[in-house]
Image: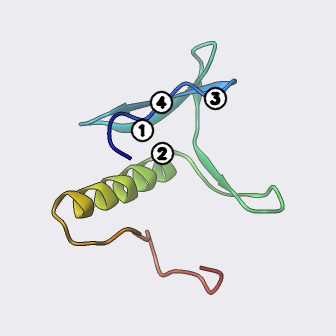
Amino acid sequence: MIGIPSTGSLTQAVLTAVCFEGLSAETREGRKATLAIIDENGKVIERGPAVAREAWNVTLACYKNFLVGQGHLRVFSGPPSAAN
């Protein structure tokens, strides 16, 4: 994918990325929101600023690896599970 990806597809939330702040979320009405990781049963297993920071760091690591030509197309925030 070359170029800037399209954004704005969420109907109830807005995500913001600032290069020196990371990711943040808010509702369409402007109220603060929290990023979360939800398992396949709908249970919230992680939430809060740590999720946003980890998502930001994994995304940056993947992109930077691509830019420096290391060939790493997948970056894990921890050991990959048996399902991966």
Q: What amino acid is at disc 4?
A: Ser
Residue 34: percent from left, percent from top: 58, 38
Cα gap from disc 2 to disc 3, whole angstroms: 20 Å
Mark 2 or 3, closer to the camera: 3
The structure residue drawn at horizontal position 38% and vertical position 54%, both measured from the top left corner, is 59
Circle 2 packing at 10 Å, graded few (<14), some (14-19), many (20+), is: some
Q: Quadrant of residue 63?
A: bottom left
Task: List x then y, in percent, for residue 61.
Answer: 30, 60
Query: Residues at badges 2 and 1 in contact (C-beta under 8 Å)?
Result: no
Image depth: mark 1 or mark 3 in front: 3
Q: In whole angstroms, how far apart are the C-alphas of marks 2 and 1?
A: 9 Å
The residue identified by callout 1 is: 23
| Secondary structure type for disc 2 | helix
Circle nearer the N terminus (1, 4): 4
The residue tagged 4 is: 6
Residue 49 is marked as 2
Dot in front, 4 or 2:
4
Q: Secondary structure at mark 3?
A: loop
The disc, 4 or 2, on the residue closer to the chain's N-terminal end is 4
Please tell me whether mark 2 or mark 1 is closer to you in this view. Answer: 1
